[in-house]
Amino acid sequence: MAPPFPTLGLAAILSVAPCLAWAGATIDGLYQGDAFGAVNFHTEGDHLVGMPAPNGPCGFDTRQTLLTGEFQGNIVMASLTVCQTGPRCSSAQTYPVLFVVNPEDGALSGTVRLQKGCTSPALPPVSSALPQTSLLVLKAAPRGAAPPPAEAPPAGAPAAAPAAPSGGDTKPTSS
């Protein structure tokens, strides 16, 4: 009996081939995740950079790089920095994430697995059975939308000034 490697290799190539046919997207502008908050994305060629928008749940500086990644068709292989808490957890940690980009609307979807014992206000767990695993979906914000505050300000506190609008365009590119 022949080893299964050639068959498995062919199956892997065939499953990836449709992804390679899509030229990819340009992810630019404001994207919103539920608990994660808003991210300002900028694409340069195949390189994606995300910066936190004001009022995010982690309180990161808006000049800090939150996400860096490389497009591989409709896949983004990225590094994502999140805030976290836990007895043996640093206050911020960078995790690898594999995002799938929806070619219709440019939404990014990926799972993040935090270190054991760590939690993040930006990444609620998928279920109690998987307490360290979170699903992160980032969708283009409507044009002209300002990022909503992560939490309501305490009563009597002044409201934060709205952020400058930046589009959420996704434009297919050709190779």
Image (tube, rainbow, N blue to C red):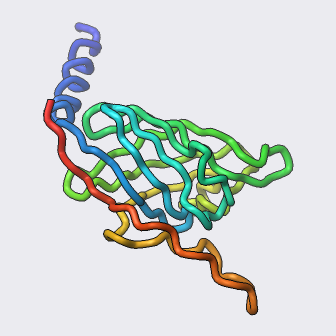
Number of numbered labels in the structure image: 0
With respect to residue 146, does 136 lie above or below?
above
Seen in the image, is 152 located left or right of residue 127?
right
**Residue 167 rendering spot, x and y as whole percentages:** 33, 61
Q: Quadrant of residue 19?
A: top left
Q: Position of residue 74 (x, y in %)?
A: 27, 40
Residue at coordinates 53% horizontally, 37% vertically from top-left?
79
The C terminus is located in which quarter?
A: top left
Tell me: 16 left or right of 43.
left
The residue positioned farthest toward the bottom in the image shown: 156
Of residues 166 and 22, the one drawn nearer to the viewer in this rendering: 166
User: For the view shown, which residue lies furthest in the top direction?
Assistant: 2
Residue located 54% across and 60% down the image = 53
Residue appearing at x 48%, y 46% in the figure: 50
The correct choice, above or below, for 6 with respect to 109 in the image is: above
> 122 or 111: nearer the eye?
122
Which quadrant, please, contains the N terminus? top left
Judging depth in this view, the residue of 91 and 142 nearest the camera is 142
Residue 42 in the image: state x and y as whole percent. Answer: 40, 45
Image height of 108 relative to 149, above or below: above
Q: Residue at x 41, y 67 (%)?
A: 165
Image position of 79 (left or right of 105): right
Q: Position of residue 24 (x, y in %)?
A: 23, 39
